[in-house]
Amino acid sequence: MKNRRGMAVAAAFLAAAALTVGFFLPDLAGRAADQKLSVQAETFAIGKVPSAADARLVDMLKLAATYENELYLDHGAVSDEVDIRISAADIINRLSEYGMMDKIECEDFSLSPFIAVKGKDQSVPSTGVQMGIIWKCYVSDPQAGIDLELLIDDRSGKMLSFGFNRYGENPGAEEEYRNEEEISKEIQEDLQEKSAGLQTLCEEYYGFRHTDTEYHTEGPSCFARIFFEDENGENITLDLERDQYGTVYTWNRTL
């Protein structure tokens, strides 16, 4: 599991970088610095601060899948809570429409904007630090037995990843009466069906072009690796991963 808790030195660099490159609004940067930092930040030159803040959606998708630390904020730079609630409702409807999960009913979203950071040494910008503002949206529907977490791009309002968990069942007991061949067949059929739905979603929602799909098994997890090209011909790989029991699914994330 990725370590997504920002350290103080990472936070210091982020606040300085935000102030330098205009990453988000000045008052937002000030509040983030006041609330999150306990050390004095050093200011870096704009040419040495790589940022995904103004990047294309494909870059934000890659950042969402690989970021290592989070610095939570009071609000986003481009989107506010109303915008993200609208985006989240649209995403949930799409996931249901394309067969990823049952339709869920929930108006009470938990929303948290944060800076996602990727880089080995976040105190030294020359090491290739990348960052961008993302919203984390958590939804729970006890009637449907689903917990859902979405990551949504602050700038575009587009879904970057999701993870959902089905609960209320005892899949382990059921698996005792099925052999490995039956389980493997069920998993493959499930992934083929759901990945086909996500392929269509990505083509219509992101405007990507599907190029290939591969299926893999690693330990207790199985995943469909779906390959796309964006409008500029750049490759993007998105994974749909599930556990053996089909109770946990993630898209563009790691279980």
Image (cartoon, rainbow, N blue to C red):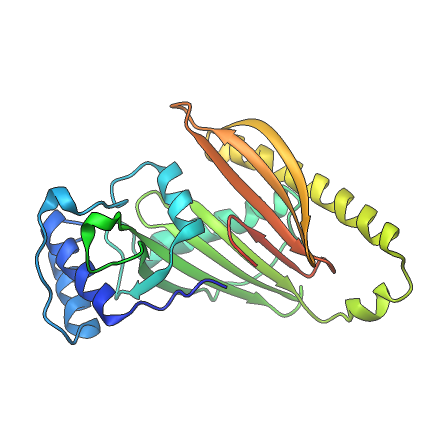
When asked about the image quadrant of residue 175, the answer is bottom right
Relative to the observer, which residue lies in front, 241 or 128?
128
Compared to residue 44, the image places residue 205 above or below, namely above
> Residue 185 at x, y = what percent?
82, 46
Relative to 162, is 51 on the left or the right? left
When asked about the image quadrant of residue 198, the answer is top right
Quick one: which residue is furthest to the bottom in this view? 38
> Residue 1 at x, y = what percent?
50, 64
Relative to 134, is 210 on the left or the right? right
Residue shown at 38% from the left, 48% from the top:
63
Residue shown at 17% from the left, 65% from the top:
12
Compared to residue 52, the image places residue 233 above or below, namely above
Relative to the observer, which residue lies in front, 125 or 91?
125
Compared to residue 192, the image places residue 116 above or below, namely below
> Residue 178 at x, y = what percent?
89, 59
> Residue 166 at x, y = what percent?
67, 64
Compared to residue 68, the image places residue 187 above or below, namely above
Residue shown at 54% from the left, 51% from the top:
92
Q: Give the quadrant of the C terminus.
A: bottom right
